[in-house]
Structure formats: structure tokens, C-alpha cells
Image (cartoon, rainbow, N blue to C red):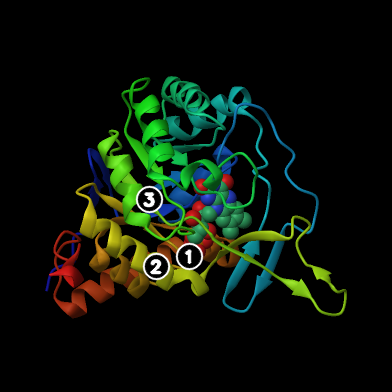
Amino acid sequence: MSVPDTGTAVGTLKFRNPLLLASGILGESAASMVRVYNSGAAGVVTKSIGSESRPGYRNPTVFEFGSGMLNAMGLPNPGIVDFGEVVRKTRASGVPTIASIFGSSPAEFAALAASMQEYGADAVELNLSCPHVEGFGAEIGSTPAMVGEVVKTVRDSVSLPIWAKMTPNVSDVAALAGAAEDAGADAIVAINTVKGMAISAKLRMPVLSHSVGGMSGRAVKYVGLRSVYEISGRCGLPVVGVGGISCGEDVAEYLMAGASAVQVGTAVSEGGPGVFGRIAGELSSFMSSEGFSSIREMVGIARR
Ligand SMILES: Cc1cc2nc3c(=O)[nH]c(=O)nc-3n(C[C@H](O)[C@H](O)[C@H](O)COP(=O)(O)O)c2cc1C
């Protein structure tokens, strides 16, 4: 059998394979994002960027456990003005670049998206889902009404593709995705981290400085799969799956649940950018041995 075609598309954006870097891991400098691309990813999502620079929370901000991690970074970032150079450099290196942004109001999201468009980003990803920063992320992305308002305001301000990133910490994630679709989003990204916390019994206190954080890695894969399955059953937009992906078969599972592409975060933080080449090879081998010749043949097959 010939080598399978692993190329895919999310709306109008075409990718050489379905593997993208998730927001928050190695997405703050052009050099690290170019390295990720050269290691086999088909594109990158930047760290979430806000209007002003933020230092984030004090340590400890990360807690690793056997099958994943908890983090409450506090959205540290250099601010939208300083980030222009990073997006321009990453794009100039030929790396498909999705710019993640967070704001505290629809107007703030729209202004950030307009800047990212000016910097040349290929798409903007709305972080409507960070679970641990008051006034941002999931605090304004947990109701269909707010999701719809943010997406619509951004839609009215920019022409570049809008990806809306969902929180899984709600009872009906598909309803949020439906609101994003109705408001003019081009793709849905699911999921951000699952709200959780760790306690140190010896110290009798929470491990993270912010107490509550977001869980990621292998432990959340089944929450992500369920979310993608529900979203792709409800709305017609392309879905980008994320959560706990660490091998080629994980990617196949997300594609079969309905995703057209995926993002990888914690596995990169654990294993470095080289995981992209390994996962791409495993996906290709899986497709060959299972008789799939294209990604399209796999998308949503578990739904049929
Ligand atoms: C350390 C860390 C930082 C993150 N920062 C962001 C962020 O800035 N914006 C965002 O939308 N998601 C952020 N995420 C969430 C990831 O993009 C992803 O949605 C989540 O971790 C699930 O994927 P994974 O299991 O492959 O890591 C972060 C995750 C981790 C572990």
C-alpha cells in the first residue's frame, strides 16, 4: 500500500499533517515555535496573549502527577504590543501560526484579534476557557450567550479565521460550540484544561499557589474525546481536538470522534518538540496498517 496522505484542513487553512502545538507550551518565542514546526508539527498556536503584560502567579504553578499535570500559570505573557515581533518572525519562517488571545470583554477580544491580524497571523484562537484566572477565560466562556457575544464582536472586527476554544467545565459543551458557530466562528477547539486541585497532606495545604488549576495530559483524554464527539454531533464547523494526546493512536481516536486536526500540549512539555515527529510517524503507520489512505476517511468514522 502507498504512503497515506496525512494532509488535512481546518476550514480554509491547510496543514501538512493534523498535529498542531497547543497554546501555552513553547509558544512564547519565534525560535521555539520554529523548532516545533521543524520537529514535525504542521502549525503552532501561540501562548495566550492579552492587552497588557502579566507576570502570572508565583510558584508553584505546575504540579506533575503520573498521568498528567495540573497548572495555574495565571496567563503570564508579554502583552499584545511586544508580541507583534514574535508573530511576524514565526510567519516569516513559513510556520502556520494561530494566535491565541484572551480578554475580559468582547471589545478587548476584538482589539487583540485586530492586532493579530495586522501582525499576519493565519487565524486567531479565542481563549474562552482558561479555568484559573478571575475575569478571563472560562469566566466569560461558560455560557452560550457570552461565547456568542465575544465571537460576534470579533467577527465584526476581523476577516481572519476565528477558532473558539471551549472549556470542558460545563454541563453542555456542545451548546457553547453551537453559540460560537451561530456567531460566525470558523472552527471549534476542544478542550482547555479540566478544573482540579492537588493537596499536600504533609503540608496540609494546596500544592499550587493559586490552589485551583487546570488538569491536562493523559488523564483528560477521555474528557476531550467525549467533548469532540458531542460538539461534532451538534455543529457543522471543523473541530480541533486537544487533551491528553501522546501517540499516533490517540490522534486517530480524536479524528474518529470528529476532529479534523489536533493539538498537543502536555506531551510536548514532557518529551520536547521531538514528540511531533514520533506521533506523525505512528499515525502514518496506524493508517497504513488499518487501510486508511487519507485523514478525511477517518474524520467522524466513530459517529457513523
Ligand atoms: C502549562 C500549560 C499552560 C497552558 N497555557 C494555555 C494558554 O495560555 N492558553 C490556552 O488556551 N490553553 C493553555 N493551556 C491548555 C492547553 O493548550 C491544552 O488545551 C490542554 O493542556 C489540554 O491538552 P494537553 O493534554 O495536550 O496538554 C495550557 C496548558 C498547560 C499544561
Nearer the observer: mark 1 or 3; the answer is 3
Which residue lies at the image location 58% right of the left edge and 29% below the top edge?
Answer: 83
Nearer the observer: mark 2 or 3; the answer is 3
**The image quarter in which residue 208 lies:** bottom right
Q: Is residue 168 above or below residue 162?
A: below
Residue 293 x, y percent position in the rendering = 14, 66
User: Type of residue at label 2?
Assistant: Ile
Which residue lies at the image location 28% right of the left edge and 64% below the top edge?
Answer: 229
Q: In this orientation, does residue 174 appear? A: yes
Q: Is mark 3 within 8 Å of ligand 1?
A: yes
Which residue lies at the image location 54% right of the left edge and 36% below the top edge?
Answer: 102
Local SS, label 2: helix
Residue topped by disc 1: 275
The one nearer the camera, 81 or 236, is 236
Mark 2 burial class by Cα count in 10 Å: few <14, some 14-19, many 20+:
many
Residue topped by disc 3: 189
Q: Is residue 58 above or below residue 153?
A: below
Alpha carbon separation for disc pair 2 and 1: 6 Å
Alpha carbon separation for disc pair 1 and 3: 21 Å
Asked if the residue at tag 3 contacts the one at tag 1, i.e. Cβ–Cβ closer than 8 Å, the answer is no
**The image quarter in which residue 285 lies:** bottom left
Q: Is residue 256 above or below residue 32?
A: below
**119 sits to left or right of 229:** right
Residue 290 x, y percent position in the rendering = 18, 79
Residue 249 x, y percent position in the rendering = 33, 75
User: Type of residue at label 3?
Assistant: Val
